[in-house]
Amino acid sequence: MRIASRILAGLAVSVLASVAQAQQYPEKAIRMIVPFPPGGGTDVVSRIVAAKLGELTGWTVVAENKPGSGGSVGLGLAAKAKADGYTIVMAQNANLVINPILGKANYDPIADFQPIVLTASAPQVLVVSKTSPIKSIKDLLTAAKAKPNAIKFATPGVGTSSHLAGELLQQRAEVKFMHVPYKGTSQAIPDLMGGRVDVYVASVPSAMAHIQEGTMRPLAVFADRRSSDLPDVPTLEELGIKDSAAVTWWGMAAPAGTPDAIVKRLSTEINRVLQLPDTKEKLKMAGAEAIGGTVQEFSALIKSDVPKWTAVIKGANVKSDD
Amino acid sequence: MELLDHFALGFSVALTFQNLAYCVLGVALGTLIGVLPGVGPSVTISMLLPFTFGLAPVSALIMLSGIYYGAQYGGSTTAILVNLPGEASAAITCLDGYQMARQGRGGKALATAAISSFIAGCIGTLLIVLLGKPLSSWAFEFGAPDYFSLMVMGLVSASVLAHGDMLKALAMVVIGLFIGLVGTDVNSGFERFTFDLPELADGVGFTVLAVGIFAVSEVAINLEQNETRSVFKASIAGLLPSLADLRTILLPALRGTAIGAFFGLLPGTGPSISAFSAYMLEKKLARDPSRFGQGAIEGVAAPEAANNAAAQTQFIPTLTLGIPGNATMALILGALVMNGIQPGPTVMTRNPEMFWGVVASMFIGNALLVALNLPLVGIWVRLLSVPYRWLFPSIIMFCALGNYSVNSSAIDVYLCAGIGVLGYVLAKLECPPAPLVLGYVLGPMMEENLRRALLLAQGDFTVFFTSPISLGFLMASLLLLVSMVLPTIRRKKAQVESEEAGAT
């Protein structure tokens, strides 16, 4: 009896303590790790969220750039940080999910992180040059089937979202392109325009200018639904290629073990931020769409992305270090 | 006379009080960060980016571009005075600029840098006006084989960088190539020489290498000497170049401008390679190449003109094609897009006030930079009279600060210190640092383009001869090689003959 009441009392105290902890949270500045250098897409998305979160709640949210190794450096730091709710990280599918599969990260996407909320996403689009004889996805697949390894597929690097989207298409449509990796986009786009390579997968905002000028022709988007920027461009799904979505997403995460109450609080507040018209507008200008949702939804997305991309990477025989 | 109308429109935009103020702010900030090593335009622009959202797009772009080309002016200051390149592209200015300063001609070197930069800046801007549109699509003609052959020409002409021991220069190029190999291989995605450090996956940064090999090692070498700098203190008089000096630097500055303008148009190359190429050309053309590395005024004028011209013409592919040539240009492009302007071939007709306003502001900005920098020369030179015990710790502090600021990575600071030790050892062995830096810059680009050219051609080596651009570069390299080898052979032959004559 006595022992039981003690246990109960102890439980009550610990529950109260955790509630109190969440109510007092945050007592100091929250560090938001941005795993890319200032000025890039991830940085802009992070800073918009950090600034709005600060405005809305009165908290101090400090965005800290920790770039390197395609985001693995920043995420590695976040995974090892103290799980007290004062370190959060703006993860992206490329660094949270893909880098560990490629053996380019020393963390596990599921065991080492506590998802908070899916923040934003951006679709990718398959483009060809305006002078290309390829006018549609059908043309592309017919040509690729007729002569395997003849279609030259340029990417901004091995293992990038663009490369993996292309691999996904090749596996779903059962064709084979020749992969031509570049170091970023600055030389890949001139080669596409000059006709030295045939296709390229770009994020919608980065290709918009060329599409509007008519120098690039969009053939399809890698998403479940059409992009609001390119309403006339079909999705691969519509063209009969199943399970072919490959969006870039950004999501807020914390080190695994961060108290549930704090995770819930952060998720609620960031969701409120994402509802603001001003946030939506700002993210749209940066080429991303505000998403939001529950902790469970984001967690489920990560858990389904890991096997999906593991299969694609295995099938494509993308080399990794170990 | 359409052009005059455009200029009238441009200046009417650029000369409004507000835009003039942003131009002044931009170039002043640019000069300042150019002077600080490592703290480059990309860091500064990314920090200021959020503040520009509230501005009119044209004002934002005027300020951001001012920072960019302003930094190219400022970068040479510390390179000349204390052998510390403030910007990556100023590394080559260290070679002769610092020697000039040691000889008490620091003021002259600084003024030469400012004047050459001004000439190049104005011509570069004029090129944007005249050739922006026709030249922009030219980048499309350049494929992987052409880039490769261009790099071959670069490496062949690099042999003129060597003064003295050819073998040592070659060894330095190879060490540079190895340092350039560190990082993720573009073709396979494998990491090379990274020792499982994720911080090394993107390679050794140019700032880390240049600051380590030039500045840190220089401090170490100077520590061996006693605190007497008679040559340094001797004379800071004659700050401004004489008329004869001006005549000497005019042609090198013009040649540097041409080289810089060319490289600026090609995505992925830019100011650093231009500065190298311009320097090598001057040394090749000089009547007495041995003066280079000993304080030749042309060795300051040509690379300074080249990096500035490249900085200007890089705006051509960025604005008219939406293809940024480097990281800083990508940021400027991002700023444009976020301000609702889509860069592209029709940007001149769709946003004429923006395009011509920015171009006009570049003329104003370049003039402002000279007005700002020439009077500063006197102040900068006084820096040299600061005692070493104050100067050295500050240099090392700025090196550490600058290196940390690029990636917020402590590894970069340690690496820079390590490279400083390497630089010290190499200096003791009398190995020249310039070929090392060149190998580091050209090697990885050469490998990347060689492999891509062969991949696209399915292993067919003739691709380097069937592309006319590539063939042209290879022929030029061959001529260069012959012109270098022939005199040596002739001399040797003469030597042998005279020896034979002596023997009989």
Image: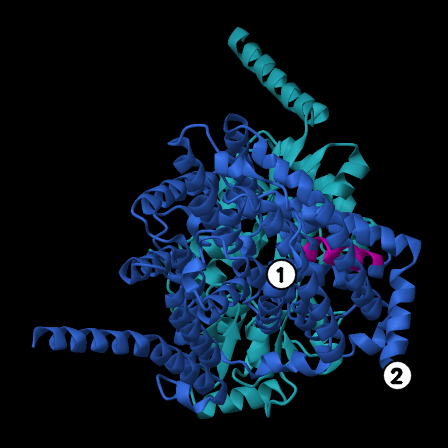
Q: Nearer the viewer, residue B366 or A119?
A: B366
Q: Which chain is blue?
A: B
Q: Label 1 belongs to which residue?
A: B244
Up-down relation of residue B456 to residue A68 (above or below): below
Q: Earlier in the sequence, mark 1 or mark 2?
A: 2
Picture coordinates of residue B26, whole percent (x, y): 76, 51
The image position of residue A270, as x and y in percent, is: 72, 43
Name the residue located 52 percent from the left edge and 71 percent from the top edge.
A155
Q: Is residue A313 above or below residue B474?
A: above
* Whether residue B192 can be seen here: yes
Q: Nearer the viewer, mark 1 or mark 2?
A: 1
Residue A223 seen by the camera: no
Q: Which residue is mark 2?
A: B1
Q: Chain of mark 2?
A: B
**Left-right relation of A105 to B486:** right
Identity of the residue drawn at 57% across and 68% down: A185
| Type of the residue with mark 2 | Met
Could you give the CA–CA distance between mark 1 and mark 2, rounded to whole angstroms? 38 Å
Q: Label 2: state its secondary structure.
A: loop
Hue of chain A?
cyan
Q: Quadrant of residue A58?
A: top right
Residue B66 falls inside the magenta stretch: yes
Q: Nearer the viewer, residue A29 or B55?
A: B55
Q: Quadrant of the C terminus of chain A?
A: bottom left
- Under mark 1, the amino acid is Ala
Q: Nearer the viewer, residue B452 or A258?
A: B452
> Residue A236 location, x and y as percent?
61, 77
- The magenta stretch spans which residues? B59-69
* Residue plotted at (68% across, 56% down): B68
